[in-house]
Amino acid sequence: MVPRVAIVVALSLLFNAASAMVEQGIAEVRFSYVADNGPENWGKLSPNFNTCSTGKHQSPVDIMQNKTAQRQELGPLSKEYYSVNATLMNSGYSIGVHYEGKAGELNINGKKYLYKQMHWHTPSEHTINGERFAAELHLVHQTEEKDVAVVAILYKYGDPNPVVTKLMPYLPQLTRESCTSNPKTSDVDVGMMDRDYSRQPLQGYYRYHGSLTTPPCTENVVWTVLARVRSISEEQVTALREPLCKDCKFNSRPVQPLNDRKVELFKVHKKGRVEAYRNKFVPGSI
């Protein structure tokens, strides 16, 4: 079993994915979202972060709906999540929830990715037709070989989000002792969390291969961006930003060049008709 201290150190560096490099704890340098430590300079901060500057398959990206390639053979997401004990964590860079034990799994092309954690970015990192949204939730999964799959959910301002509503009483308990060169992680036990996203109807998704959206920007991530845009309140977005370091409150990396990649689209057939995700968003909440 990995000691809790090791988990905390890893998550304090990077909530964006449970990569092997992150789990080992690359904490020799701090990154942020503004000024000298901001995204445009991540690749210069450490040799371990070179891919942030040199990588050709970086994330996030702008998804141009009229340029996606429809692939029905992708099929519906094969996923299952369970109710497990969880810890709300503030890395200084993002607010996330880390799970104990088996929280669920996602199967992509016969490969099993175990569900590790979720975290928020405000505003969204991915954009659709150039439009940026109020928030983005990343559900992070990892194989035994340390490959990563992230399911991204976009949010627009509107009704409160039920998941964030459950966490609102705990957010003020998160503290930051320091946001200097080696910030410490703050965490709060939130007990049992119901993460059964399999109950939610899937209404299509976008798929592409990319990277972690924070250093070390490793290019081993399968991205699934759900087509259905959920809602979140302005109060909730403010609450998710409040505990973060001053230079990380708007924690979204700018979109990266798509280069030679194609974004694929899976549509859901409902009662004999196809949902047209190329031309519209389907609002809702989760």
Image: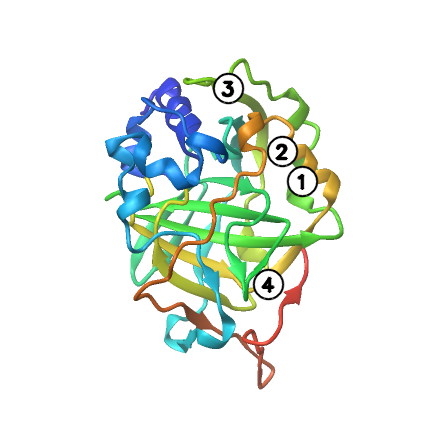
Q: Which mark is residue 179?
A: 3
Q: Separation of disc 3 and disc 2 at Cα? A: 14 Å
Report which residue position mark 2 lands on.
241
Report which residue position mark 1 lands on.
237
Q: Residues within 10 Å of mark 1 (few under 14, many from 20)?
A: many
Q: Amino acid at mark 1?
A: Val
Residue drawn at the location 29% of the way across and 61% of the way down: 110
Q: Amino acid at mark 2?
A: Arg
User: x, y (%) of residue 124?
Assistant: 56, 49
Asked whether the residues under the numbered discs 3 and 1 touch, taking CB atoms below 8 Å apart as contact, a structural biologist would say: no
In the displayed structure, would residue 216 be above or below residue 87?
below
In the displayed structure, would residue 114 be above or below residue 42?
below
Report which residue position mark 4 lands on.
228
User: x, y (%) of residue 44?
Assistant: 31, 34
Chain-order first, disc 1 or disc 4? 4
User: x, y (%) of residue 8?
Assistant: 42, 23
36, 96: nearer the viewer: 36
SS at badge 3: loop
Q: Residues within 10 Å of mark 4 (few under 14, many from 20)?
A: many
> Residue 126, can we see it?
yes
